[in-house]
Amino acid sequence: MIGKVVAGFLAAFVLTASAAADDAPPLGEPRYSFHQVPDGFLRLDSETGEVALCGMQPVGWACLAAPEDRTVLENEIARLQRENAALKQDLLSRGLPLPPGTTAELPPPDNGNYLTLRLPDSADIDRMVALAGSVWQRLIRAVSDMSNRVLHKG
């Protein structure tokens, strides 16, 4: 038991030392923080937010990136927001006040994780062409002015 604790502490020390050697963060702000879990240590990178599980592997101590599925998290957040809005509407429909600090809100639209994309119309394209023409004319004037300055100085 003591051997595992010493090995875990030694591994955390080695990982911290190697992390400090790579990119030295400002003093007092370590880049990595470690939290003990049953299978080893969780390593949190304070610069990138990445989480890795560090522990004994067949080849020795190693840190493996923890899987993260952003879509699952966003879907759960949207589901909870819809549920929260529905509960608030239920309270209001029964004539009950909302808890302090909350406001009535509409549930976020359930678009089935589809992105709504608005394609440009003719007016949008005309504005972009006019903008590109304006930028081009300014560039030509700037080059012309610069060449005139160079020719008149020499």
Image: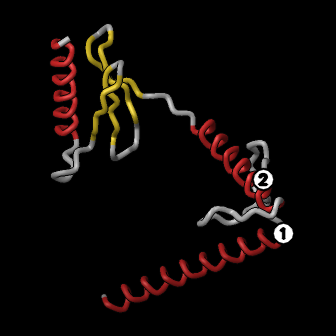
Q: Are marks 2 and 1 in contact (CB under 8 Å)?
A: no
Q: For residue 8, which quarter of the picture?
A: top left
Q: Secondary structure at mark 1?
A: helix
> Mark 2: which amino acid?
Pro
Q: For residue 15, which quarter of the picture?
A: top left
Pointer 1: residues within 10 angstroms few (<14), some, or many (20+)? few
Q: Residue at x 63, y 64 (%)?
A: 102
Pointer 2: residues within 10 angstroms few (<14), some, or many (20+)? few
Q: Secondary structure at mark 2?
A: loop
- Give me the disc on residue 53: none
x and y percent of residue 26 in the render?
19, 53
Tell how many labels: 2
Report the quarter where the C terminus lies.
bottom left
In front: 147, or 103?
103
Mark positioned earlier in the residue sequence (2 or 1): 2
Q: Residue at x 17, y 27 (%)?
A: 14
Report the quarter where the N terminus lies.
top left
Q: Residue at x 32, y 23 (%)?
A: 54
Q: In the drawing, does residue 50 fall left or right of residue 120?
A: left
Q: From the viewer's perspective, is residue 101 above or below residue 111?
A: below
Q: Nearer the viewer, mark 2 or mark 1?
A: 2
Q: Which residue is mark 1?
A: 122
In front: 64, or 34?
34
In front: 56, or 152?
56
> Mark 1: which amino acid?
Ser
Q: How is the image coloured?
A: secondary structure
Q: In the drawing, does residue 48 fall left or right of residue 14?
A: right
Q: In the drawing, does residue 151 fall left or right of residue 78?
A: left
Q: Residue at the far top: name it.
A: 58
- Give me the disc on residue 109: 2
Q: Residue at x 59, y 66 (%)?
A: 101
